């Protein structure tokens, strides 16, 4: 559904992303993990068409992403970026989420029955129906993330790209969002999500990608990617890997007897 072929990105003399290949298939959840500065957000921006690759290309439904018009792309590909700031002007939650239907509307912005149906489904899926008339300027960081997810879902895309959608959520909300993404994938949606929580990534992913210093170090099922020797090389010797449910690995941190983490040594 969405393919990256020999994709790389360079700024001046700095190689931010080495050539890589990946595929986001319909009906699956692909999770990208890696340390800070690994190039995760850069890769997502390339997949979304925000950045132009230095080499290679991204193909959406076998057609180069660069050949899609902005409107066509928005009808097939939605992006959620929780770093987007809250609007500073009055807008209800429902009005904001309805912006996800813009790619389907005429220049007058009229809502058709199918637009209202998609809007209602997005609000329902994200548990926002009761709050739809609330001013979005009053939202917390976690609430704002749910609203952004609802807007992306309102686009009714074939592929959904999400950059750390659980970053400001409590534990319960994290699990709820990931369970929702898993449920949506079962309807045929192809999902690509960046996470830092390795256990969440392991539990909810069909395909796991591990990026480090711009290099795709491993990809495949979680139990083949999150191996102790790989984790030690990238994250340090602070992890134990145990068998979990349904063949998913369970990671446990341990620091007893270990030296300080590398970021602390550099301070």
Image: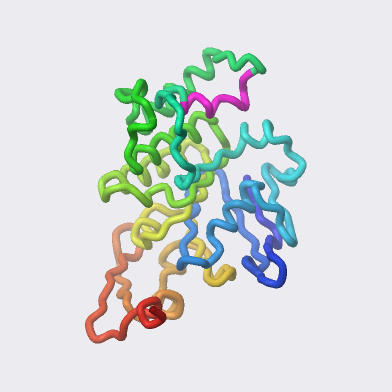
Above or below, comparing residue 5 to residue 232 in the picture: above
Q: Which residue sits at x=52%, y=50%?
A: 192
Front position in the image: 131 or 195: 131
Q: Is residue 78 magenta?
A: no
Colour mode of the rendering: rainbow
Specify start and end residues of the magenta stretch as a single range. 96-105
The x, y position of residue 241, in whole percent, is 32, 72
Residue at the farthest left position: 256
Reply yes or no: does residue 97 show up in magenta.
yes
Q: Residue at x 37, y 26 (%)?
A: 135
Vertical position of residue 194 compared to residue 215: above or below: above
Residue 9 lies left or right of residue 227; in this view the side is right
**Residue sitting at x 67%, y 52%:** 51
Q: Where residue 71 sits: x, y (%)?
A: 67, 31
Q: Where is residue 262, by image quadrant?
A: bottom left
Left or right: where 115 falls relative to 124: right
């Amino acid at each position: 559904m969405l393919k990256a072929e020999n994709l790389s990105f360079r700024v001046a003399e700095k190689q931010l992303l080495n050539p890589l290949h990946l595929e986001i298939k319909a009906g699956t959840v692909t999770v990208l993990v890696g340390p800070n500065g690994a190039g995760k957000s850069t890769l997502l921006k390339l997949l979304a068409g925000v950045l132009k690759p230095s080499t290679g290309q991204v193909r959406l439904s076998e057609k180069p992403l660069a050949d899609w018009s902005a409107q066509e792309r928005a009808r097939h590909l939605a992006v959620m970026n929780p770093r987007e700031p809250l609007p500073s002007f009055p807008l209800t939650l429902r009005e904001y989420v309805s912006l996800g239907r813009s790619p389907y509307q005429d220049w007058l912005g009229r809502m058709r029955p199918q637009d209202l149906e998609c809007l209602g489904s997005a609000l329902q899926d994200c548990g926002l129906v009761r709050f739809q008339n609330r001013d979005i300027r009053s939202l917390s960081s976690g609430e704002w993330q749910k609203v952004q997810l609802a807007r992306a879902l309102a686009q009714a895309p074939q592929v959904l790209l999400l950059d750390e959608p659980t970053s400001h959520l409590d534990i319960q909300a994290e699990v709820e969002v990931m369970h929702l993404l898993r449920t949506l994938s079962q309807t045929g949606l192809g999902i690509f999500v960046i996470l830092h929580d390795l256990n969440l990534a392991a539990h909810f992913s069909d395909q796991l990608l591990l990026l480090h210093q711009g290099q795709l170090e491993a990809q495949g099922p979680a139990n083949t990617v999150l191996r102790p020797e790989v984790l030690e090389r990238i994250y340090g010797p602070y992890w134990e890997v145990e068998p979990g449910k349904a063949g998913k690995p369970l990671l446990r941190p341990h620091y007893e007897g270990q030296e300080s983490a590398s970021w602390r040594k550099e301070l």
